[in-house]
Image (spheres, rainbow, N blue to C red):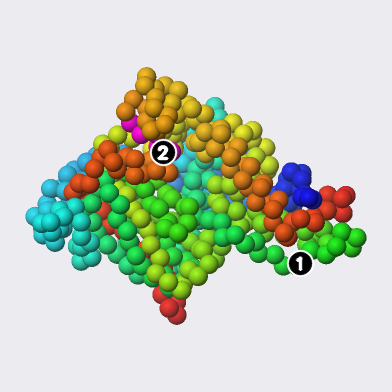
Amino acid sequence: MVDGFTEYARYGHERLCRTAYLLTRDWAAAEDLVQTALVKAWIVWRRIEGDPDRYVYRIIVNTHASWWRRRWRGEVPTAAVPESLAERDIARAVTDREALWAATGALPGQQRAVLVLHYFADLTHQQVADVLGCLLGTVKKQLSRALARLRVDSALHDLGMEEAVR
Amino acid sequence: MTRYTENDLRTVFADYSEDGPARPPHLETIVRRGRRARLRRRTAIGVAAGAVVAAVGVGGALLPGLSGNAADPASGPSTWATISAEPPGTVRGMRGEALSVIHSETHRTMGAPVTVVYRPTSVNTGHSIRCADPKAWVVVQHVGTSGADFGRCGGSKDGPDSQHDQLSVPPGWLDKPQSLKIWVFPADAPIADGPWKDDGTPNPDVPTDDPYAACKKADRKQGTCDGRFIQDVVHARPERLAAVVGRQRGEPWTIKIYDKLAGS
């Protein structure tokens, strides 16, 4: 039992911490969250070893949500006002990236969790629903709302990050 | 026209998390904590039932203030009363900051909402609710926002159940009193099993993609499965369950609001 757990914890630790960091935005809190989740996983390892990710991601998301009830305030902190498209450059891309990072951080907790699980952890919509314990339709709705909020944000209208960075 | 793509999101998430954790996993610590928790859990199972019975059994006799008033036996905060499952007086917040109680109320109302009004002293406001019956169900609606929490009343934790920060509070947080609308339902309220058990493990009887799948009689309009309310429905629309349960006087529960005190 412990061998399988040890292997999972050792090789999954960085990935889990990065996921937790995207939720907490604080490395110390992320590491605490992951350790808490792994302790709980160790206790029930026999029952979850076939698919531990689902359990561990769920503990991370729920534990984080219990501390940080983020709700949309209708504003996005951003350090710079976007310039015109013609003036796009690498420095601009960094600013755009910061704006997108800040905007995702201002999303309600569940919407951010859906984004992180789907776009960072590469879970399918159904897997995200399994982790969050909600309906597939709820995940799609939350994802759609999150993307809609980011799209309509004025700070993000003129992003050309992909083109500028690459 | 929107200028970012889904790949931009992937790039931002990957870039901002690329530093990775500062330390490798402390496997010995994890296993040690796991063993301790497992031992605590086994011990608690033996003790909990007796403790709850004792608390409920003597509570009424020792705490006459909890009897409420004659006109409305379920109402009335008893700010002086104590119950065995009371939240701690001080807690540590998410970032380790000390949080003190700025407001506390004890009620016995079940099946009907109780509004708790308080004045925050910082953006780090949090709260904890503890019930004499830890299996009682609780819905907490954050008035003025769409936020709500739902679950069993639960056991002890080191920190508050929920805590705000700079980003989570709505504008003008400190300018006026804030309120929570709390619904406590008895442990045996007609609430269907969810896709996850209380210990967080999957419940194979309830598929996550359709909580009605195993129902003999599903009422999707009302949100019930064989006469019991789906958990998502209770979370979003507690008044439906309240209409069935009805206002009643139950075992006491206490909410404490925590915040940073001025100067701390």
Q: Residue A127, percent across and down? A: 59, 32
Q: Nearer the viewer, residue A127 or B39?
A: A127
Tell me, yes or no, if residue B15 can be seen here: yes
Q: Amino acid at mark 1?
A: Val
User: Looking at the image, which residue is at 53% across and 56% down?
Assistant: A71
Q: Residue A133, percent across and down? A: 49, 36
**Which label belongs to residue B201?**
none
**Magenta segment boundaries in residue numbering:** B228-232
Residue B25 vs B221, above or below: the answer is below
Which chain letter matches label 2?
B
Q: Amino acid at mark 2?
A: Val
Q: Which residue is mark 2?
A: B233
Q: Nearer the viewer, residue B92 or A112?
A: A112
User: Looking at the image, which residue is at 52% across and 29% down?
Assistant: B209
Q: Residue B44, percent across and down? A: 29, 43
The magenta stretch spans residue B204: no
Circle 2 Cα neighbour tier, 10 Å, few/some/many (<14 / 14–19 / ≥20): some
Which chain letter matches label 1?
A
Q: Quadrant of the C terminus of chain B?
A: bottom left
- Residue most toward the left? B61
Q: Residue A9, percent across and down? A: 58, 40
* A8 on left or right of B105: right
- Residue most toward the bottom? B263
> Dot 2 lies on which element?
helix
**Which label belongs to residue A81?**
1
